[in-house]
Image (cartoon, helix red, strand yellow):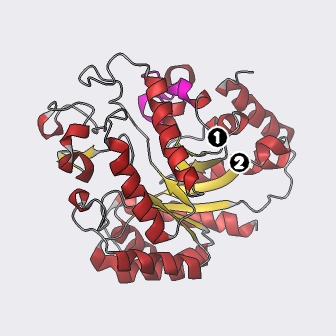
Amino acid sequence: MKIDIRTASAVWTLTVALGLHAAPPTLPVRGLHVMAPKPDEMDLALRFIREGLAKEGVNTLVMEFDYRYQFTRRPEVIDPDALSKDDVKKIAAACRQAGVRLIPQINCLGHQSWAGTTAGLLRAHPELDETPGKYPQNSGIYCRSYCPLHPKVHEIVFDLIDELAEVTGADAFHAGMDEIFLLGEDDCERCKGKNKAELLAGEVKALHDHLAQSGRTLWIWGDRFLDGATTGMGKWEASMNGTQDAIRMVPKDIVICDWHYERVLPSITYFAMEGFPVVACPWRKPNVALGQLAMVRDTRAQATSEIGDRMQGVLQSTWVPFGPFARAYFGERTGDTEVHEAVQTFRALFEELRASQ
């Protein structure tokens, strides 16, 4: 049976309306997503892991490295402010000591540029671009994508994933894959005219299957699996270019990170009803974060065990540089509203999580 997201919404609404609130169980994932620190922020990073994460009760840390690691297998992709192998080993050791599961991240497929800067992969290998030769200085686009059908792309991407997963000792890997707008473009001789959902699903499966060979789990953002028109979520939080059907073409053991920052939306229940383990991902609004947590708890308490057990917990994102976030957490005033809002949300969310454990 095809599950409509409106059905998922009805399930959660009925649960709340019944007022049947069992004692909230411990959530498997109580997580935080951060950007990797700069090399000169290593002392701060280790302190934040040992003191901050341990104090707040964080048990999962997704750290987005992208190309800011000193890769030895593909050194041509290294971006500025890259961490050394020794740096990353120290981060991994601190996480182990604090009882925190470290999951590294490299954005795959999309997010290969930001503003006028092209990131390491396409800077070093422009032949992998989905729109080769177009959009000088990235003008007129959100972010570049690599071509998922290029015959050389996976041997490079897999080398990067393997090296970072190995140095962190990770049992899972986050591949990003949010906000992909350039896919199946007419400018690409391989992807032109192909079904966008099939292209997305093919790349997800390629990453999943590669990680499975080493016993690792794939995590991705979930927005491209949601129908932006039917749900009214639009092109950012969901898809408006036809990729939503990929949800039924990919393995069900992928962990979906369901991000919504302005509202409490029922898509986390939708993903669970479709068979995926899923985490709710707020950002910088405490009321949204607490509302998403309540949705997770209520569904785990009242739905069938098959649905409830897939509601794994929460993963708050920060979306500011690591240094300002960690310094603000320790009490430093930065003058950046988003930094302080993210810290405020982090404190409020994990205070509530601790109160119920």
Residue at image x 52%, y 82%? 50
Density class for disc 2 (Cα within 10 Å; few <14, some 14-19, many ≥20) is many
**Vertical arrangement, residue 273 with respect to residue 283, above or below:** above
| In the displayed structure image, the side of residue 275 where residue 63 appears, left or right | left
Asked if the magenta segment contains residue 56, the reply would be no
- Label 1 and label 2: CA atoms lie apart by 8 Å
Please tell me whether mark 1 sits on a helix, a strand or a loop.
helix
Looking at the picture, which amino acid does disc 1 mark?
Ile
The disc at residue 268 is: 1
Which residues lie in the magenta part? 232-246
Residue at image x 54%, y 50%? 219
Quadrant in the picture for the C terminus:
bottom right
**Vertical arrangement, residue 226 with respect to residue 93, above or below:** above
Residue at image x 50%, y 42%? 262
**Vertical arrangement, residue 70 with respect to residue 280, above or below:** below
Q: Are marks 1 and 2 in contact (CB under 8 Å)?
A: yes
Occupied quadrant, residue 154? top left
Seen as rendered, the residue at the extreme left is 136
Q: Which residue is mark 2?
A: 311
Residue at image x 21%, y 58%? 76
The picture places residue 130, in percent across and down from the top left corner, at 27, 32
